[in-house]
Image (spheres, helix red, strand yellow):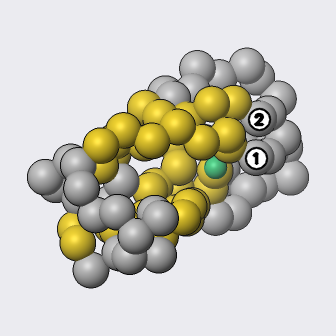
Amino acid sequence: MPEIQIPSKVVATEIDMFNFKYRCPCCYTSYKKDGEPRKNSFNKYHTHGSNGDLSNRIETRTHHGLNPFEVTIIIDDTTVRK
Ligand SMILES: [Zn+2]
């Protein structure tokens, strides 16, 4: 698999009292046999605990997967409160 540059900063799309959700820049819903994402696949969402805090802030989490890395999740005015 080719080495790809992963953007480690993402903006959360949704937040509620339990979780926030962001679209992962490197995980896709389906892959071809060679490991490349399929044309009709889309980026997967990941969910992390919000600790009951709906305020704008920056969170850091470890992305689990084939290549673990630190991901910075920005919760701002565009993040939908549920
Ligand atoms: Zn991911």
Q: Residues within 10 Å of mark 1 (few under 14, many from 20)?
A: few
In the rendered view, does 1 fall on the left or right side of 14? right
Q: Residue at x 73, y 19 (%)?
A: 3
User: Of the residues shown, which amino acid type is indicated by label 1?
Assistant: His
Q: Is residue 50 above or below residue 58?
A: below
Mark 1 highlights which residue? 64
Q: Which residue is mark 2?
A: 68
Does the Cβ of the disc 1 residue fall within 8 Å of ligand 1?
yes
Q: If the image is split into quadrants, where does the C terminus sit?
A: bottom left
Q: Amino acid at mark 2?
A: Pro
Q: Residues within 10 Å of mark 2 (few under 14, many from 20)?
A: few
Find numbered disc 2 in the image and state the secondary structure of the residue it sits on: loop
Q: How much space separates mark 2 and mark 1, taking CA atoms?
A: 5 Å
Horizontal and vertical percent for residue 68? 77, 35
Q: In the rendering, at what x and y percent does residue 33 appear?
A: 86, 52
Give yes or no for contact between labels 2 and 1 (Cβ–Cβ under 8 Å).
yes
Which one is in front, 76 or 57? 57
Image point (77%, 54%), residue name: 32
Mark 2 Cβ and ligand 1 under 8 Å apart: no
Q: Which of the image's four quarters has the N terminus?
A: top right
Give the quadrant of residue 41: bottom right
Residue 50 position, x and y percent, is 46, 63
- Residue 4 coordinates in the image, percent (x, y): 65, 23
Please state if 55 lies on the left or on the right of 15 as rendered.
left
Compared to 80, does 22 lie above or below? above
